[in-house]
Image (cartoon, grey):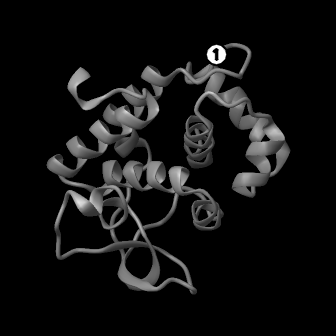
Amino acid sequence: MRPQDIAILLKIASFGDQPWLGKDLAFALSISASEVSESLNRSSFAGLLDDFKKNLMKKSLLEFLEFGFKYVFPQKPGPIVRGLPTAHSASPLKKMIHSSESYVWPDASGEYRGQAIEPLYPGIVHAAKMDKEFYELVALVDALRIGRSREQFIAIRELKKRILKYNEEKY
């Protein structure tokens, strides 16, 4: 697995039940069509997409995000920079978690200052600015990478709600 594979899977999740094509993913994420194709193959092999590479294996993805993601793609906050908020500094977690620490993806045009978090892949800032739902999913995933137990618990609850379309009462 590569970091952009997770971004592609989250973009597929953001489509919900809408049909999508590889070229849609490539355009939305600023990733080449060949890299999207290779990513879909890796994700299918890993059991995160079905054999036809069209249906997201939502529970498998959530299991990986909850229990393995932070070990495969670890991250330590860096210096204070200008950028786009992520993790608990972005919606939806910023409404639930109050912290003196701020985390951002470095972006020269960013209006916020915080500790730098390396994005999953270089084009994620642009893709996040274009799609609010995708942005929130990736920010939640960053909370799994760098958050403490409480932030991780809330982030996984929110991811389940958004990816599985569950109500909070169901889990």
Front position in the image: 86 or 75: 86
> What residue sits 71% from the left and 22% below the top?
53
- Kindly identify the amino acid type of the residue bearing the numbered disc 1: Asp
**Neighbour tally class for label 1: few under 14, some 14-19, many 20 plus, Cα within 10 Å:** some
Looking at the image, residue 160 lies above or below residue 82: above
Please state the horizontal and vertical placement of residue 44, each as a whole percent of the image. Answer: 65, 22
Specify the quadrant of the image occupied by residue 158: top left
Looking at the image, residue 76 lies above or below residue 164: below
Q: How many labels were placed on the picture?
A: 1
Residue 151 as seen in the image, left or right of residue 67? left
Please state the horizontal and vertical placement of residue 102, each as a whole percent of the image. Answer: 29, 74
> What residue sits 41% from the left and 73% below the top?
104
Please state the horizontal and vertical placement of residue 72, each as a whole percent of the image. Answer: 43, 42
> What residue sits 61% from the left and 43% below the top?
11
Whether residue 171 appears in this view of the structure is no
Q: Secondary structure at mark 1?
A: loop
Q: Tell me the quarter of the image containing the C terminus.
A: top left
Looking at the image, residue 21 lies above or below residue 147: above
> Which residue bears the numbered disc 1?
50
Front position in the image: 16 or 44: 16
Residue 57 as seen in the image, left or right of residue 143? right
> What residue sits 55% from the left and 24% below the top?
48
Front position in the image: 3 or 30: 30
